[in-house]
Image (tube, helix red, strand yellow):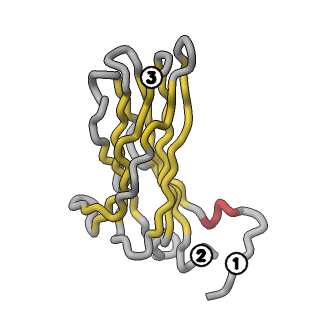
Amino acid sequence: MTDIVIQHNVGAYLKAKIGSAFVSATAGGTGDNASVNGAAVDRLSSSTGALAASGVFNVFYSATLAATKTLSLTALKVQDSADGSTWADYLTPSAPGVVATGASGGSTETGVSTLAVDLNSARRYVRVVFTPDLSASGTDTASLLATAVLAGYDRIPS
């Protein structure tokens, strides 16, 4: 395979996809410590007919936290599927754990947890699965969204 040196327009080699719906969690309530199944992401490029060989899955978050209280991702994994409806675990790394901690007096914390994945042996569809967990017993909230960035196609756009 020929090496490619990308000096500009790297976006032509990447495909960004929505990885989940926006998710809300309230400490001790709805969405807290509940598994979120992401959206099916099709690795097949409609322009080249090639499958993405690698991906980066991101879980973006914004959390309103009381002092010293935390937002954790107690699970973060990637699943694959041949048909976009029957899923199996593809990669189950160690959970990221605490991703945000409330500052003194409480604060709003924002950030992203990232997982890079070799997709060479994955089936056509992939999705991210994550579990947000707020440590407070009430009032703390978080909003989360997953995305996928796919690359490494064996055929590039002309």
Tag 3 residue: 69
The percent coordinates of residue 114 (x first, y second) are: 51, 50
User: For mark 1, does the 10 Å Cα neighbourhood hold few (<14), some (14 to 19), or many (20 or more) residues?
Assistant: few
Distance from Cα at disc 1 to Cα at disc 2: 10 Å
User: For mark 3, does the 10 Å Cα neighbourhood hold few (<14), some (14 to 19), or many (20 or more) residues?
Assistant: many
Report if the CB atoms under discs 3 and 2 are less than 8 Å apart: no
Decide which of tag 1 and tag 2 comes sooner along the chain: 1
Decide which of tag 1 and tag 3 comes sooner along the chain: 1
The percent coordinates of residue 103 (x first, y second) are: 56, 20
On the rendered structure, is 139 left or right of 46?
left
Report if the CB atoms under discs 1 and 2 are less than 8 Å apart: yes
Report if the CB atoms under discs 1 and 3 are less than 8 Å apart: no
User: For mark 2, does the 10 Å Cα neighbourhood hold few (<14), some (14 to 19), or many (20 or more) residues?
Assistant: some
Q: Secondary structure at mark 1?
A: loop
Q: Is residue 97 above or below residue 79?
A: above
The quadrant in which the N terminus is found is bottom right
Q: Secondary structure at mark 3?
A: loop
The percent coordinates of residue 77 (x first, y second) are: 36, 54
Residue type at the position of mark 1:
Ile
The percent coordinates of residue 147 (x first, y second) are: 48, 48
The tag on residue 156 is: 2
The answer to which quarter of the image holds residue 33 is: top left
Task: Give the number of the mark in front: 1 or 3.
Answer: 3
The answer to which quarter of the image holds residue 110 is: top right
Tag 1 residue: 4
Distance from Cα at disc 3 to Cα at disc 2: 46 Å
Distance from Cα at disc 1 to Cα at disc 3: 46 Å
Q: Is residue 3 above or below residue 46?
A: below
Q: Going 34% across and 41% down the picture, which residue do you hit?
A: 131
Residue type at the position of mark 3:
Lys
Q: Going 24% across and 60% down the picture, which residue do you hit?
A: 87
Q: Going 38% across and 75% down the picture, which residue do you hit?
A: 121
